[in-house]
Structures are given as structure tokens and as C-alpha cells.
Image (cartoon, rainbow, N blue to C red):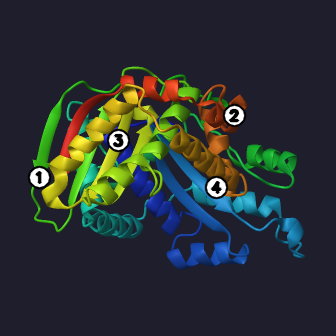
Amino acid sequence: MRLPLTSHNLAYASLLAKMQMNATLYFPTINKQQEELSKMYDLQFEAVPQLFGKDIILSYVANFVEPIEILDPEYTYAKIIEDLALIIEHPTLDDQIIALSKRQLSSDYQEIMAEPANFALDRFFKIWYQNEPDYAENFMGPIDEIENATSKDLKLFVDNLKMVPATVIGLVKDPDLVDHLVKEEFKYPGLMKNFTESNLTIPAPKRDLQLSDVHNNLQAQLFMGYGYDLTLPFYGQIVGQVLGQYLAGDPSSKLFTKIREEAGAAYAVEANNYANNSLFLINAGLDPNKVEEAKAIIKGEIEAIAAGEIDSDLLKKSKKALLNIQLIGKDKENWRLAQMLRGELFDGYSLFDRENAIKRVTETQLAKFAKNLFLNESYVLR
């Protein structure tokens, strides 16, 4: 299901997902729901809110043994789809389940925020989107809104969900039969709406910020966020991924060798292209005394790439590493489902050849990508 990203929607989607994984109207206790799933040969059910730029995708994922593999006349596609519909379409608004789910999310939140890297990432996005707070949440939405949610508000949220665009994707041995059964069981009006979204990209704000917080951690967390002005086509997103691999994909990458090995400053370095946020983010866990040195190295390397100073052998190695990830992913159901979801969400994506795009990335294109980057935010948690 696709719905607009607001802090309210993310908080309620997170709470609803947790509730549905605990119990639902037809399986009103945790034990009853788990017992039913266990009867279905340990069917694995998960509800997951994901962020895609301006939208939230609330995904319901079921992994199950193919009925043809089981000699059980009561275990059929029809029974699987019927149970999934009972769970997904009929959430319980029981006060005890709501309270339990709130406690679980609160515990999850405390555990997440106890990690300095997660705290720093959360703080980074809140600064990055300080003028657009609906886009600032990076995990589960505002914990105070989750804790203050009422059954009345949740019912309104659930009722509204039935109208948002929805789609069904899957990998099964008999897709025609499953497609028929899904249409019979799921009555969401949103399934009749167009799931594709033309533009989910959030423009990068333009501000040159250098901020820090002191928590007296043994390790400093450095986040350097580069923005760019354009909405990237699929090929441009691949160039960004190659740049991330080139800079921090493995121990032979540029920032690993310069910050971690030569300067002895970093414990870990990452570089990721968040295309839907117009953000190229470099982050590192550092010796607190070497933060400024690391910042200078990162700035210098981005400037060098923009000037065309690119290690051709390392670029080839980076592209090969991404091709290997692509090859491994093809054998994993979750990776294939993620690609199918993007095919439903982004017009033309299903026809996009990722493998060929990775092979085609050149030094000139890497330099052009770097030239479009502007340092927007430097945040340090010490």
C-alpha cells in the first residue's frame, strides 16, 4: 500500500504493522495467530513500512511452503490467501494489543537510539529536514505520537488505508491461480488505483550546516551529506551506487584506504546514494581526535573525483563488486521481490537493465555526478 510520508502516517503505519504481527480480529491473541501460522507449515508473515522519498510503502510479506510440496489436502493456495486476508484486512483494535504493541515499539526505539550511529543518523535527518519535519523521521515515526495513539485514531487510519493505492506481487508456482484468489479475497478499493508514482523525489534543501553534539562516546560519528539538484533517472542512480562502492564499498576503496589505513582514523566508513532524497551520504565511525582530518579527506576525494582524478582499476573493481551483488541477489526471493516492487512503483523500471547500466558507468560519468554534489550538512556526534 502506498501512502504519503508524514510523521503521523509513519508512526501509525509502524504501530499498525506491529499490532498485525501480534494479533488480529480473527486471531485475537498472539498465541492464536502464531498457532494458525504454525498450522500453515510455519508460514512467515511480516508487516513492514518502508520509505521511498515522499511516500511510505506498507508491505505485507508472506513466505510459505508451496502447497504442491506438501501432501496435505487442507493446505492449499486458497487456504493461505484466506488466512492472509483475515490477518491483513481485519486488524484488531483491542486495547491490550495496542498497549502491548506500543511497549514493543518503545523498547525497539530505545534499543535503536542506544546505538550512537543510529542516534547520529536520526539527528542528521532531523537537521537535514528541519524545515520539512514530515520527512525527518528515519525509523518508525515520532515515538511520542505512537505512545499517544488511540483506538479511535487507529480506526480512522485503518479505514483510510483501504482507499490508498495498492498492488500485489509475488513469486509462486501457479501465479494465475494465486492472482485469481487474491482478487476474490482482497476487497481493497485501492487495488483498483494506479500504484505507479511519477515523482517521489524530495528536493535537497540548500544550506551549508556544520553542527555537532557531545555525548562523550568513545567513538565519534561523522555524517557528511551532499545534496544534488536534479531528479536522477535510473541510470544516474546506478552511477551514484558505483560512486558509493568506489568510495567505501570494501577495504580497497578510496575512503577506506585514506581514512582507515593511511590516517588510522576510522573504524568504519560508508557511502550511500539516497536517490529519492537527493542525498549522497558519507558516514564514518572515527577516533574523536581525527574528525577534522577525516572531513578534509572526504572533501578532498569528492573534489578530486569531480576534477576527473579517478583510479580506473578501482572503478573496474567497484563495478565488478556491484555486478556480483546483482548476481547473488537474483537467487534471493527478497531481492527479486524488491525489484518487482520498484517495477510496480516506478514507471519503466521493470524494463531497466541494471546489469548493463553498471557495466556502462564511465570515469566521465562518475566525475559528472561528483560535480553536481554540494556539501549541505556536516554533523558530528562525539
Asked if residue 170 lies left or right of residue 113, the reply is right
Q: Residue at x 76, y 52 (%)?
A: 171
Is label 4 or label 3 in front?
3
Determine whether the residue tagged by mark 4 lies in a helix, strand or loop.
helix
Name which of mark 1 and mark 4 comes first in the sequence.
1
Name which of mark 1 and mark 2 comes first in the sequence.
1
Above or below, comparing residue 326 to residue 228 in the picture? below
Image x and y of residue 136, in percent: 29, 41
Q: Check disc 3 and report the residue beneath it.
A: 281
Is label 1 or label 3 in front?
3
Disc 1/disc 4 C-alpha distance (Å): 37 Å
Determine whether the residue tagged by mark 2 lies in a helix, strand or loop.
helix
Name which of mark 2 and mark 4 comes first in the sequence.
4
Is label 3 or label 2 in front?
2
Q: Residue at x 33, y 38 (%)?
A: 301
Disc 1/disc 2 C-alpha distance (Å): 43 Å
Image x and y of residue 227, in percent: 33, 29
Q: Residue at x 32, y 27 (%)?
A: 204
Badge count: 4
Asked if residue 278 lies left or right of residue 353, the reply is left
